[in-house]
Image: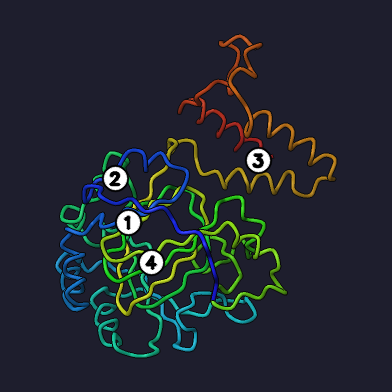
Amino acid sequence: MLTINHKVKEIHHCQPGNIPEFVLSSTEPMILKNFGSNWPAVIAGKTSPQLAADYLRKFYTNAPITAYYGEPKNNGRVFYNENMTGFNFNSSKANLNQVLDKLLEHVNDPQPPTMYVGSTEINHCLPGYNEENNASIDHLKPLTSIWLGNKSKIAAHFDFPNNLACCVVGSRKFTLFPPEQLENLYVGPMEFSPGGQEISLVDFDHPDFVKYPKFKQALASAQVAELDAGDALFLPSMWWHHVESLTAFNVLVTHWWRDSPAFMGRPNNALMLAMLSLKDLPLAQRKAWQAQFNYYIFEHDQEDFSHIPTAAQGRLSKPLDELLAKQIRADLLNKLKR
C-alpha cells in the first residue's frame, strides 16, 4: 500500500450546497466537508443502500446506460488485460434498474464482481435529480454526471475541465498528483484506454518500483483526499487522480466545467497536431519549435506584440474571439487536406 504524507486541504463551515468563490479560482484541490449533507440523496444513502437505490429509481427515465462488469479476481481494479490487447472487464448497454438490483444482490459479498456505471449525463438519465440535490454552480453551466457501483479502483488519469466531485453515497479515496508529475506516472497508450483517457500503468495497491522507479518522485508530490457521503472535492483542471470506491454501494456526482469558451476547442487537438508535425523532427528543430511555442503560447505576454499595430495583430490579438477562432480553424482544416 502507498504511504502518502500530504492531505488535501479541507474547508469546513461552508454553507451546504454553496461553493465559495475562492475555491473556484484555486489551482489546488480542496475538500468541502459536508457540502451536500442536506441533500435527499445523501440522507437516503446514509440510511441504507436500498433507500439510496429507491431514491435514484424515482428519477430514472429507462434510458439505456453503459455498465461495466469485472470478475471478482480483479479486486475492483478497472484496467487492461494481462497483455494489454483489451481490458479486464466487459461493457454493455443496460437498464439502470437492473444494475441497481445486481448491486444490492451482492452488497454483502466479501469479494463481489466489479459493477460500475461511469460518466452518465444526469439530466438525461435522471431528470429532476439536480433540482433536489443542487451544487449551486449552474452559472458555470457544468456537465453533470453520475458514477455508481460497488468497490472499484480507477487508474490515475486527468481531465481537462475543472471538477466538483460530490460523494453522495458511500466513501471514496482520491490520490492526486499535480499536472507536472506526468513524466513520473508511466502513462499508457493514448488511443486505447479503459475510459477513453490515457492512464497510469502503476498498480497503486502493489507498485513495482523496479519497473516504475520514477513513481517514487510522483508520490513525493501526491495528495490524498478521503471523502465521506456529503463531502465534495474541487479538482482543478489537469490534475491526475486515482479514484477508489471503498464501499459496497456508492454514488458520485461530478460537475465538469471549463474556464475557456467552447469555441477554442480542446487542447488535446493541438497536442495531436504537434505529434503529427513536430514529434519526429531532429532534436535541434524540436528545440527551435519549443522556443516558438514558449514565445507565442506558453510564456507570452501581450506586451510581446506591442511593436505590432493593434489593427494588424490578427491572430496575435488577445483575447481570441469566436470569429477569429473560426477563421483559424478553417485555415487549419484547408492546410490539413493538402
Question: What residue is pinned by disc 3?
Answer: 336
Question: From what the image shows, is residue 4 above or below residue 285?
Answer: below
SS type, badge 3: helix
Identify the mark nearer the N-term, 3 or 4: 4
Disc 4/disc 2 C-alpha distance (Å) = 24 Å
CA gap, disc 1 to disc 3?
Answer: 43 Å
Q: How is the image coloured?
A: rainbow
In the picture of the structure, the residue carrying the numbered disc 2 is 19
Where disc 2 sits, the SS reads loop
Question: Whole-percent x and y of residue 21?
Answer: 33, 38
Whichever of labels 2 and 3 marks the residue nearer the N terminus, that label is: 2
Residue type at mark 2: give it: Ile
Q: Quadrant of residue 248?
A: bottom left
> In terms of image quadrants, where is residue 282?
top right
Closer to the chain start, of discs 4 and 2, is 2
Is label 4 in contact with label 1 (beta carbons under 8 Å)? no
Q: Earlier in the sequence, mark 4 or mark 1?
A: 4
Q: Quadrant of residue 166?
A: bottom left
